[in-house]
Image: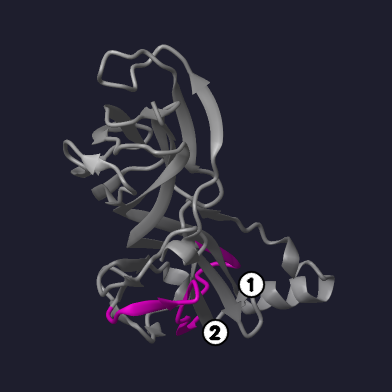
Amino acid sequence: MRNELGLALLMVVLAAGCVGQTDGVMQSMLTLDIISGGAEDMAISAKVPEFARTEKDFNWQLIAEPAITVRDFGIGVYDRCSFSNVGQESFSLPAIPANNTQIFTLTYRTPKVEFEKTCKVYFSANYTSNATLSTTVAALQDAEYMQRKQAGSLGDIPTSTWKSRNPLELSISWGPEGMPLLDSSSNYMYIDYRNAGNGAIPNLKPGQVMIQVPANMGDGISCDDYSWNAGSRTLTLSRQLDFLQKQAKRSTCTFTAKASQPVDSATVVISAAYRYIIEGSVGIPLLAR
């Protein structure tokens, strides 16, 4: 997984006045931004000493800062290079609220250093997060549709799409004509799932994805991969969707549009819970004295 996910984007910022060595030697700490930006919904950074002295203990920290609330969070080192572990090196929390900072402190002992080098420590983090997508569904009655078609104003129907920033990217497209929909016409809704992050999303499990379907999409909607509850007007994922090369299988739904007024606009909402796994590394310079 180390080769697939790549290692970190390391932007080094000096943070003075911290104690990195536990033998009483005062030194500066380096703050390394390891995972941040792009589609990631959590930033992970590390604070490490400017250097680790031979055969001495030192402290360093992993820092997690989620942009949204995450659940079942775990983080831990799986390759500590040549250091020996003095304390805890794996941590778990039931949840981290959005925009909260969690700091995890590790204590390592440096081996006897014959020559100066940088020792790279590898860690992984995993957690459950939620992605949301909402988009406008517009259905037009026959007269309104034909009038707008002749006037060339079908594209003037106001629509909007909103999605949360997550590694899991959800998208909806429509067929065969796209938006807006003609009343009583047969249509397709396509749902795509893409991993836009640098980590791994193994799969989406049954029950983890729900779609709230508006009334203007009719009462007889049918989707592969989903079960339909007419009472609550929800589609629920009913089979596991595995990710391969950052994509999961597309889901296809068929439905008949139902316009209760000349321009009937509503919103379809998708909410998906998913497990995310990401790796990173921290380079710690070793000093031979």
Q: Which of 58 and 195 is in front in this view?
A: 58
* Residue 151: quadrant of the picture: bottom right
Amino acid at dot 1: Met
SS under mark 1: loop
Residue farthest to the front, as pictured = 114
- Quadrant where the C terminus is found in the figure: top left
* Residue 282: quadrant of the picture: top left
> Residue tagged by mark 1?
179
* Residue 65: quadrant of the picture: top left
Task: Provide residue 209's location: percent of width, then percent of height.
Answer: 33, 68
On the question of residue 257 being in view, the answer is no
Task: Provide residue 10's location: percent of width, then percent of height.
Answer: 54, 40
Amino acid at dot 2: Asn
- Residue bounds of the magenta highlight: 238-266
- With 92 as the anchor, is 225 left or right in this view? right
Report the Cα–Cα distance between label 1 and label 2.
Answer: 10 Å
Is 176 one of the magenta-colored residues?
no
For image coordinates 41% across by 66% down, the residue present is: 1
Mark 1: few/some/many CA within 10 Å (<14, 14-19, 20+)? some
The numbered dot on residue 36 is none
Task: Provide residue 77's location: percent of width, then percent of height.
Answer: 28, 49
Q: Which of 59 and 286 is in front in this view?
A: 286
SS under mark 2: strand
Q: Which of 49 and 37 is in front in this view?
A: 49
Q: How many labels does the image show?
A: 2
> Residue tagged by mark 2?
187
Q: Nearer the viewer, residue 134 or 233?
A: 134
Residue farthest to the right, as pictured = 151
Is 247 one of the magenta-colored residues?
yes
- With 33 as the anchor, is 121 left or right in this view? left
Sequence order check: which comes first, mark 1 or mark 2? 1
